[in-house]
Structure formats: structure tokens, C-alpha cells
């Protein structure tokens, strides 16, 4: 029982790992900083998008993080991982492409919008949920206004923050339908465009179009969103141990 209680939380990093994606190269540094500064030890495993197509690919993990790097080799794999995290109440974070696909999964599997598409993955589709942004955010920093009382507000401790982006796609249509089915859009840019989504009633389900993993000049001080995911993962692991005793 002692060994089980001491096990680190297991983190599934979903995405097609590449040295050319800045977020991916940051992850090992963030994990080291979380362990050294926060005493939050995570046992992380990369799960390529094609491997995530397996039904139980992320089941049994204590947190799931869908990282940037779209177009993914398997849209279906990423969507399956997100659905498992949502339905099994596994702490979840989606950043950039992870944010976009979290909305896509919710639209299809919860709202019944089975034909909506991501323009990067399926440019010939008739109905887009995710389309090219009017102004690309690749390499940009911009303000995000956060709703009081939201998970995002509790995590950041602020109603306004400036965040880094590296994306050219974002949500467009059907957002009212997603909202009506329970998804909360808790962060917007200065023009009112959605930048944060979360799922009330879930232990931890947060998705950001910005990339908190790129915060700061280096990875020595993980962004509050990354720290919050790590804390949620540790809590999930502790609860799993408690239930097994």
C-alpha cells in the first residue's frame, strides 16, 4: 500500500511529438520545474495521435494534455482521447490544437453536430466549427479577459492576462449550441472572440487557444494553468489509490 500511495501521477501527452514544435520541447523542462519548485511529480508518457485511436489509450492516466502540433496524423485519435478524458472524469488540458479539437469533440459527441469540421483537417467540408482566424495569431501575444467565478479565473487568479499564441485557426460557428449544451466559454480576447473553454461539473477540464506552456522566457516557472493541471493529476492519483485500498 505504501508503494501504491507513493506512485507519481501519470500524465498522457497526446500529440505527434516533434523537435520542431516549441511546445513539445518545453514539456520536459516544465515537468522538471513542476517537480523541483512545486513538488508535483508527474510520470509523463507521449501518446502519438494514431496510438490514441485505441479505446483505452488514455484510460488509467491521471491527466490528459492534448498539445499543439496540428494537423495531427489522426484526428480520430485525438478526439477519442478527449472524449475519454471528458467521460471518465480524467483531468484534461487542451492547448492550441488541443483547444480546437476539444470543441470539435464536444460539438460532435455531445451536441449532435456530427458534420462539423476543422478546416485544417477537412478543407472541403460544408460546415466548419474551426476555421482560419481573420488575423493569424502565430507568434503573437494578446490580452485575455477571464470571467469571474470560472475555473480559469480560479486557476489564474486574474480577470485579465496576456498570453502567447502560435495558431492560425479558431472557433467560428455553433458556439451558442455548445454553450447551450453545457460548455462554458470563460475567456475572450478584447474583441470578444473565445479563447478559453471549460466544462462545469468535471473535476478539471480546461482548454485554451493560447499556449501556457510557452509562458515566460524559459520553463522555470510553469504557467498557472500548467500548475493547475499538475495539481489535478496528483489529486486524481491520490483518489485512485484511496479507492483501491
Image: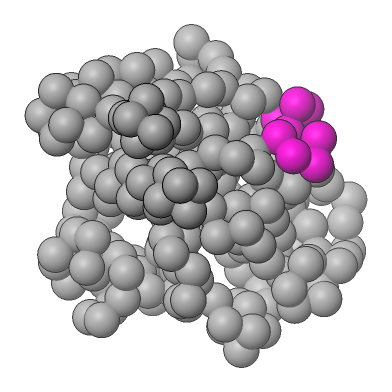
| Furthest residue in direction left, as rendered | 37
Whether 56 is among the magenta residues is yes
| Residue 5 image position (x, y, % from top left) | 35, 35
The magenta stretch spans residue 224? no
Question: What residue is shown at x 14% (from left), y 35% (from top)?
Answer: 38
Q: Residue at x 75, y 26 (%)?
A: 51
Q: Position of residue 96 (x, y in %)?
A: 49, 45
In the rendered view, does 180 fall on the left or right side of 157?
A: right
Q: Is residue 22 visible?
A: no
Magenta stretch, main secondary structure class: loop
The image shows residue 219 at horizontal and vertical percentages of 21, 25
Q: Quadrant of the N terminus?
A: top left
Front residue of 83/177: it is 83
At 62% from the left edge and 58% from the top edge, which residue is drawn?
Answer: 88
Whether residue 103 sits left or right of residue 224 in the image: it is right
Q: Where 102 falls versus 37 (above or below)?
A: below
Front-most of 6 and 140? 6
Magenta stretch? 49-57
In depth, the one of 171 and 155 nearer the eye is 155
* Residue extending furthest toward the top: 19
Q: Quadrant of residue 154?
A: bottom left
Q: Quadrant of residue 22?
A: top left
Q: Quadrant of residue 155?
A: bottom left
Amino acid at each position: 500500500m505504501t508503494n501504491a500511495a507513493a506512485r507519481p501521477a501519470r500524465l498522457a501527452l497526446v500529440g505527434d511529438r516533434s523537435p520542431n514544435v516549441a511546445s513539445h520541447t518545453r514539456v520536459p523542462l516544465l515537468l522538471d520545474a513542476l517537480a523541483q519548485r512545486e513538488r508535483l511529480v508527474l510520470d509523463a508518457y507521449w501518446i502519438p495521435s494514431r496510438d490514441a485511436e485505441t479505446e483505452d489509450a488514455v484510460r488509467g492516466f491521471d491527466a490528459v494534455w492534448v498539445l499543439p502540433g496540428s494537423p495531427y496524423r489522426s484526428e480520430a485519435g485525438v478526439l477519442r482521447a478527449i472524449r475519454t478524458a471528458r467521460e471518465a472524469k480524467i483531468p484534461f488540458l487542451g492547448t492550441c490544437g488541443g483547444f480546437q479539437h476539444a470543441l470539435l469533440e464536444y460539438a460532435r459527441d455531445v451536441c449532435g453536430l456530427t458534420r462539423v469540421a476543422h478546416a485544417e483537417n477537412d478543407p472541403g467540408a460544408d460546415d466548419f466549427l474551426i476555421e482560419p482566424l481573420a488575423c493569424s495569431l502565430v507568434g503573437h501575444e494578446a490580452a485575455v479577459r477571464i470571467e469571474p467565478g470560472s475555473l480559469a479565473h480560479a486557476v489564474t487568479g486574474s480577470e485579465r492576462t496576456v498570453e502567447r499564441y502560435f495558431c492560425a485557426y479558431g472557433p467560428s460557428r455553433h458556439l451558442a449550441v455548445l454553450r447551450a449544451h453545457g460548455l462554458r466559454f470563460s475567456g475572450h480576447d478584447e474583441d470578444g472572440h473565445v479563447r478559453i473553454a471549460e466544462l462545469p461539473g468535471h473535476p478539471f477540464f480546461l482548454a485554451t487557444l493560447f499556449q501556457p506552456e510557452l509562458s515566460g522566457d524559459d520553463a522555470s516557472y510553469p504557467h498557472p494553468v500548467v500548475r493547475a493541471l499538475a495539481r489535478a493529476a496528483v489529486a486524481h492519483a491520490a483518489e485512485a489509490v484511496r479507492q483501491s485500498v
